Image (cartoon, grey):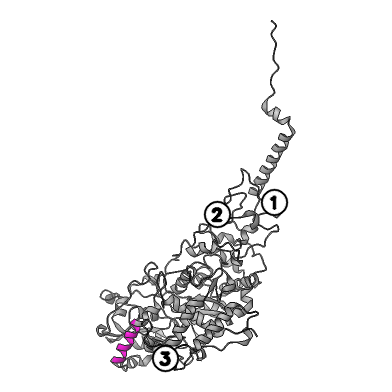
Amino acid sequence: MPHHISSPRPLLPRKILQRRPAVVACAAVAVLAAAAILLLAAPTTEAPSRALLAGGSLPSRPREEPHAERFAESSSLTPAEAPPPSLKSSFPSKIAPVPSMFSAPEPEHLDTKSSFPSKIAPVPSMFSAPEPEHLETKSSFPSKIAPVPSMFSAPEPEHLETKANFSTRITPSPSMFFEPASSPVESFDDRSMEEPEHPDIKENSPKESAPFLQEPIDSTSSSDVSSDRVLPPDPEQIPLWSTAADEDLIYAKKEIANAPLVSGHPDLYAPLFRNVSIFKRSYELMEGLLKVYIYHDGAKPIFHSPYLKGIYASEGWFMKLIEGDQSFVVRDPNRAHLFYLPYSSRQLEHNLYVPGSNTLEPLSIYVKNYIDMISAKFPYWNRTKGTDHFFVACHDWGPYTTKLHDELRKNAIKALCNADLSEGVFIRGRDVSLPETFVRSPRKPLGGIGGKPASKRSILAFFAGQMHGRVRPILLRHWGGKDDADMRIYSRLPRRITRRMNYVQHMKSTKYCICPMGYEVNSPRIVEAIYYECVPVIIADNFVLPFDDVLDWSAFSVVVPERDVPRLKEILLEIPESRYVAMQSNVRKVQRHFLWHPKPVKYDIFHMILHSVWFSRVNQVLQVQ
């Protein structure tokens, strides 16, 4: 039988290529692969820290406080919850994301199709939403490239490359306990609490001290709403349109004016207050009505990064607690009575100030651009010209960073530690004097408080600290270096003394703790004296004392005009012992209003700050004509 040679079978690739559909499919895959490679290799105009979704893995969500997760879970896209503009501009306008083996898996929580518009979004400004903590925020702003102008940025002076000068120094906050390197002064042997300030940064030379303004004021009137502690409303600040929040404020204003008489309240000691009835009714209305909206805009660490340690801790603790609050904070800005600007004056100084420059212009420009941005992006600032917005700043430079924005300086409620009337920035009756609290340990803010009873305090007066400002050198010249057991006045505690009694032990054993102003009128010693149950002696003309709108400081402190420093011992010895004992007892009672708690409690410092802002807003509200 003849042998038949079988014809060879065609190879599989050749068989596939003989089919037209297969050829088209292969070509399509090749085109998609090439497109993906081009996307990976193409330079991006976005910030380097923002990875392209098609060419790399999307950064994981930033580790936020619980409040941030609550905001993100909201299904309604309020203005502050819209997708970050930097992600919107990451894709070309004509190319949709193509799922393939070259595409990184997208997170389930991001609706890609609806998140990216067909047109390229504007280049995000320095006020973009907070970035993930593991990213280098400073890489978002090239140090050599001029800033890209946007509709949200005010034109910057040509002579100052603001962003190029300071934005590269911004680094993200690793956690809510972000703490820049502590000052050498914080580790003094005398355990004083001060940090050195940068001198010569004010635009104007220091003014001559005005007459002292802290004499006790009669508070027997039935309402603080009409007292001299309240600024009359400005008719030019009538809101452009009325809201339900305005009606709430008008109702609260009437209720406070007709507050029922309070006597013998178990939690409120009447002698501490100018009018305890007014305070109690106002506080109750705040608890029942007040809603606060927090802007999400702003990049860390200047925004949303509370600084919780040291002498500027007040602003950080307030930021931390308000952003974690569930009682007052709302996600819907249309329900808000107040709008919080969540930036830190301490972080502005730490990240933007150029050492040796002796100018605050970069900080002021940064704040001005932020206000311009939110006023262009949202309608809320423009409705009231900023009168229902507030910020909290404890750094000495907080007031001066507002000088480039007229509405921020004149209309917004400024809660400031540097509450100096002579500078023309702090407005009594509208602004809030913020207590300057020195927090040694953020994890134990209440550690070490308390002191000896009045009968066991053997030292008449005590002060130890740096010799800056106009008052302290005079204090030291008259009372320092003398062999006087009653007057313990030092520039710095000598080691021979700290071996027996350190700084804190001195305050806990002293009757009157001297609290002179430093570079500015405010001093952390005032609250520190209250912590250690020592009667504070305040020497700072033009200073509006913390919570001056509700507290009667004459009940638990001594105020001495600067001109009377040479008579300091005489003034203190003239105070009867019974009067001192009553003041020291009142210091212990008022202490609860100056304490930070990890979880806020009624009438503590967090609620007192919020109440002062609320009280100011209630008194400024005007009805639409």
Q: Which of marks 3 and 1 is nearer the N terminus?
A: 1
- Kind of element beneath mark 3: loop
Residue farthest along the top direction in this orientation = 1
Which residue is disc 3 drawn over? 561
- Kind of element beneath mark 1: loop
Residue 525: quarter of image: bottom left
Q: Is disc 1 in contact with disc 2, using a CB cutoff of under 8 Å?
A: no
Q: Which of marks 3 and 2 is nearer the N terminus?
A: 2
How many residues crowd around disc 1 within 10 Å: few (fewer than 14), some, or many (20 or more)? few
Label count reads 3
The disc labelled 3 sits on which kind of residue?
Pro
* Helix, strand or loop for the magenta stretch, by majority: helix
Q: Which of 197 and 288 is in front in this view?
A: 288
The disc labelled 1 sits on which kind of residue?
Ile
Side of 310 where 157 appears, left or right:
right
Which residue is disc 1 drawn over? 95
In three-dimensional space, the C-alpha distance between marks 1 and 2, rounded to whole angstroms, equals: 21 Å
x, y (%) of residue 337?
55, 77
Q: What stretch is highlighted in magenta?
A: 578-588
The tag on residue 59 is: 2
Residue 8: quarter of image: top right
In the picture shown, does residue 241 fall above or below 67?
below
Residue 545 shows in this picture: no
- The verdict on residue 587 being magenta is yes
Q: Which of 482 and 451 is in front in this view?
A: 451
- Kind of element beneath mark 2: loop
Residue 21: quarter of image: top right
The mark closer to the camera, 3 or 2, is 2
In three-dimensional space, the C-alpha distance between marks 3 and 1, rounded to whole angstroms, equals: 71 Å
Q: In which quarter of the image is the C terminus?
A: bottom right
